[in-house]
Amino acid sequence: MQNRRSISPHAGRCRNFTLTTVVHGREVGERTQVSIEKERTLHSTTSEGLPSMLEGVELLITGGVGPGLVQRLARHGVQVAVTDEADPDRALQAWLVGDLHPEAPGAESDGGRGNCF
């Protein structure tokens, strides 16, 4: 069960996402929590596009992701950043200050913890 408080170790099976808007290196507006059905996770929709509530997302911060998903997300314009940080606030801050970098398509990672950010 994903706890909606910490970064998920498995992006493909994540069902709870926190969406936010970043403009010029600053978070603007409020965060939005979205949940998707088990049948619409990124793992379950391997040959399809993104779940509708994730369309337009440009960055996914997660604790772990396989190379196939990184490549598929890249085809939809989504960068993936992998972190060992469990706290979404600290992970986002690391991205904003340039301490967290996107995965190269084809790279494999592991690590992590409930909520994809």
Image (cartoon, rainbow, N blue to C red):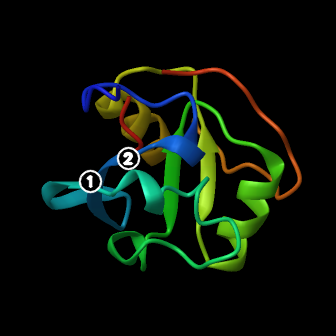
Three-letter amino acid code at the position of disc 2 = Arg
The residue lying at 77 percent from left, 33 percent from top is 109
Badge 2 marks a residue whose secondary structure is loop
Rendered view: 57 above or below 13: below
Badge 1 marks a residue whose secondary structure is strand
Work out whether residue 16 or residue 22 is closer to the camera in this orientation and state it. Answer: 16
Give the image location of residue 69, x and y in percent.
72, 56
* Quadrant in the picture for the N terminus: top left
Residue 21 appears in the rendering: yes
The residue lying at 26 percent from left, 58 percent from top is 20
Rendered view: 77 above or below 12: below
| Residue 70 relative to residue 7: left or right | right
Rendered view: 52 above or below 80: below
Circle 1 packing at 10 Å, graded few (<14), some (14-19), many (20+), is some
| Quadrant of residue 72 within the rendered picture | bottom right
Work out whether residue 79 or residue 34 is closer to the camera in this orientation and state it. Answer: 34
Residue 98 appears in the rendering: no
Residue 91 numbered tag: none
Three-letter amino acid code at the position of disc 1 = Ser
How far apart are the two marked residues, 2 and 1, measured between alpha carbons?
Answer: 5 Å
Location of mark 2 (residue):
15
Residue 35 numbered tag: 1
* Circles 2, 1 touching at the beta carbon (< 8 Å): yes
Rendered view: 110 above or below 116: above
